Amino acid sequence: MNIHIITVAPELLESPFSHSIMKRAQDKSLLNIQLHNLRKWAINKHAQVDDYQYGGGAGMVMMCEPLASAIDELQQEKKFDEIIFMTPDGDAFNQHTANQLSLKENILIICGHYKGIDQRIRDTYITKEISIGDYVLSGGELAAAVVVDAIGRLIPGVLNDETSALFDSFQDNLLAPPVYTRPADFRGMKVPEILLQGDQKKVEEWRYEQALQHTKDRRPDLLKGDE
Ligand code: ADE
């Protein structure tokens, strides 16, 4: 999968993709992430990419020309399956969207800054708008890192044990059951007996019941299907 990201702060995105599972995915050539500094397409020698908003009001708006030039140039080399804008007023990101995006071949992500991007870019180029939660970040970069991480780990071959993503929280709309490792007795707190008995069928049943109860307690909305 190829993920291109247009940003005014590429440094913000370097670290999240340089470690652990995201690094391994790139080392194995399962994931190719390319960061593009929007200032490369700035309108003048002052590296300007934003301007005051029409109608007045605080906050700068990212201009049409740099974004359009950047997207046009990248589109000449690749046909993107999705052009995503990270924005707090986008559709709420969830595991279902991560699953869907993990099946795409080429994705372009635009990170907003300041007050956002000119509406005309949203109207003409953007195919999907994503929010990672009901709060405002200072830019779309951290949100893009969250989305890329959630997608990247789903690409077949990225996780060592591919089945492990299947049992993540939110797959099947259930939160994950509790997990335990050694020792079996920690300061008098014992690991549930059923996990020690070696009966895999019983373990699976126990895990399912725990996941269901955990979801009922914490996120009953997931069980109603209205995530
Ligand atoms: N940019 C700023 N805040 C954001 C959010 N909550 N989700 C996605 N992009 C954002």
Image (cartoon, helix red, strand yellow):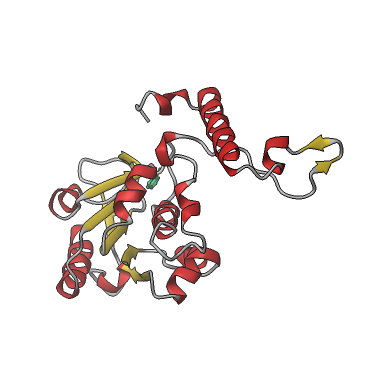
Asked if residue 20 lies left or right of residue 63, the reply is right
Q: Is residue 93 visible?
A: no
Q: Position of residue 74 (x, y in %)?
A: 21, 71
Instruction: Tell me if residue 69 comes above or below residue 186 in the rendering.
Output: below
Instruction: Tell me if residue 56 comes above or below residue 147 in the rendering.
Output: above
Q: Quadrant of residue 95?
A: top left
Quadrant containing the C terminus is top left
- Between 196 and 43, the residue placed more toward the observer is 196
- Between 185 and 99, the residue placed more toward the observer is 185
Quadrant containing the N terminus is bottom left
Task: Please report the residue visible at 17 percent of the width from the left and 67 percent of the height from the top.
Answer: 79
Q: Position of residue 75 (x, y in %)?
A: 17, 69
Task: Please report the residue visible at 71 percent of the width from the left and 43 percent of the height from the top.
Answer: 196
Asked if residue 194 lies left or right of residue 141, the reply is right
- Between 137 and 31, the residue placed more toward the observer is 31
Q: Position of residue 118 (x, y in %)?
A: 21, 50
Task: Please report the residue visible at 60 percent of the width from the left and 39 percent of the height from the top.
Answer: 203
Q: Residue furthest left?
A: 124
Asked if residue 66 lies left or right of residue 177, the reply is left
